[in-house]
Amino acid sequence: MARQAIAVMASGRGTNLAAILEAATQGKCPVDVRVVISNKADAPALRIARDAGVETILFLNPKDYQNRTDYDLACADVIEKAGCQWVVLAGYMRILSSAFVQRFKHRLINIHPALLPAFIGADGVGDALRYGAKVAGCTVHLVDEEVDSGPILAQVSVPVLDSDTRESLHARIQKEEYKLYPETLRRMVEQGFSLDGRRVIWNQSI
């Protein structure tokens, strides 16, 4: 199976980016991380990308653009010029414009630290803990115009312990993220999927 080119958009530490790069290097995930874009000049994700020898690494400053759509379309142009088949959000802390989402419809994915559709938004881990949930987890999903609402590709559950803090629960969820994201990318490349309404139907393995 030939590798497929992906672009990763990240705002922060880049730990999921690092997990994807490691899985690709080990032959566990047939992707070529060809582009990494960040909206933060000091994002550690950029250093991770440089250390891994990613071909195109860019900090694009949102302040250099008149509006969100213009910024997103500049990012999209870079991604398409590099020939990327998939766009992977890894801790990207900007809400994407409709123009960007539509340009990469069904090719744009995100990971969220909660079992969607529960606990959408910026603090899924803390929200689950405050609510008193006994099970938390993470979700890989397609991105649509609403926040954390696209069709679900894969999920993993994590028990919430009585002793958990937000930090301890988040750490256990992240351990699962680092396995689930590369594995889901592998299935997307090797199996593919179709949509039945909101349901993601994975193609049969060959």
Image: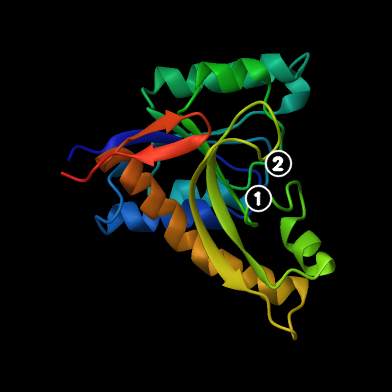
Q: Nearer the viewer, residue 103 or 78?
A: 103
The quadrant in which residue 150 appears is top right
Instruction: Residue type at mark 1: give it.
Output: Gly
Above or below for 130 versus 32? below
Colour convention: rainbow
Residue sitting at x 68%, y 46%: 42
Report which quarter residue 53 is drawn in: top left
Measure the alpha-carbon separation of dots 1 and 2. Answer: 8 Å
Alpha-carbon neighbours of circle 1 within 10 Å: few (<14), some, or many (≥20)? some
Going from N to C along the chain, the mark reached first, 1 or 2, is 1
Q: Which residue is mark 2?
A: 93
Any part of residue 136 in sight: yes
Q: Secondary structure at mark 2?
A: loop
Q: In the rendered structure, which amino acid carries the disc numbered 2?
A: Met
Residue under the image location 73 percent in, 80 percent down: 164
Quadrant of the drawing holding the N terminus = top left
In contact (CB < 8 Å): disc 1 and disc 2: yes
* Residue 112 in the image: above or below residue 83: below
Q: Residue placed at 65% from the left, 44% from the top?
A: 11
Residue 147 is situated, as x and y percent measured from the top left of the image, at 71, 36
Q: Nearer the viewer, mark 1 or mark 2?
A: 2
| Numbered disc 1: secondary structure | loop
Q: Residue furthest front?
A: 196
In this rendering, the count of numbered labels is: 2
Q: Point out residue 72 in the picture as x, y percentages from the top left corner.
A: 64, 21
Q: Which mark is residue 12?
A: 1
Looking at the image, which residue is at 74% across and 53% down?
119
Q: Residue 24 at what x, y percent from top left?
A: 32, 52
Does residue 74 appear in the picture of this structure?
no
> Is the C terminus in the top left, top right, bottom left or bottom right quadrant?
top left
Disc assigned to residue 149 = none
